[in-house]
Amino acid sequence: AACDDNSPLNDVVLSRSVDNGTTWSAPAIVYPGFGRFDYRNPTAVFSSSGALLLQFVNATHEPWHTQQMVSHDEGVSWSAPDDPALGVADSFLAGPANGLLLSSKSPAPGRLVMCGTNYYDFTHKPTPLGARVWFSDDAGAPGSWTSPPAFVGNMSECAMAELGDGSLLLNMRNE
């Protein structure tokens, strides 16, 4: 079974604002699909070090996997895509929403939090579909990501918000 929302080939693109969102640049290609690669669910977050992290799904071939790029100049230039070394979360797919840098009200200020979905093979279905959360206490450095072992079954495509008391609110698509 195929998803109707799958685009055959995608670039990773970004628009920037330098005036607090009043105006925006034309979309610029951050990482090109070269007409033969399928990238989706770009999810960006600023780290406590000021770096901008971008995780996205490479869905070109099975198995799909998450890749990460970093910008140290607010999205003007980017590192090459790399495996973020999600550890236990290697089968997690980023997005398609937002990442968070937790505030001083959080029990873990400065922690980066991302959410997404377990990898799901539509042909073989080796793992149950479920929403996952992963986090880094080291500004998103490769190998610094970890995840609680639990996931929310039959859910995907989560989005997050930090509430005023520092707790997290997750909103997920019920599959």
Image: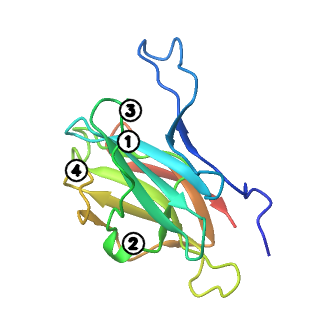
Task: Give the mark nearest the N terminus, 2 or 1.
Answer: 1
Between 97 and 171, the one lying in front of the other is: 97
Amino acid type, label 4: Pro
Residue at label 1? 45
Between 36 and 27, the one lying in front of the other is: 36
Eye-nearest disc, 2 or 4: 2
In the image, what residue occupies the spot 59% across and 46% down? 11
Do tag 3 and tag 2 residues touch (Cβ < 8 Å)?
Answer: no
Residue at label 2? 89
Element on which disc 4 rests: loop
In the image, what residue occupies the spot 62% across and 58% down? 38
Real-space CA distance between mark 3 and mark 1, rounded to the nearest whole angstrom: 11 Å
Q: Which mark is residue 107?
A: 4
- Characterize the local packing of mark 2: few (<14), some (14-19) or many (20 or more) Cα atoms within 10 angstroms: many
| Image vertical order of residue 107 relative to residue 155, above or below | above
Task: Give the mark nearest the N terminus, 3 or 4.
Answer: 3
| Residue 130, position as x, y percentages in the image | 56, 71
Residue 131 visible in the snapshot: no
Q: Which mark is residue 75?
A: 3
Do tag 3 and tag 4 residues touch (Cβ < 8 Å)?
Answer: no
Task: Give the mark nearest the N terminus, 2 or 4.
Answer: 2
Amino acid type, label 1: Val
Do tag 2 and tag 4 residues touch (Cβ < 8 Å)?
Answer: no
| Image vertical order of residue 126 relative to residue 1, above or below | below
Q: Quadrant of the C terminus?
A: bottom right
Amino acid type, label 2: Ala
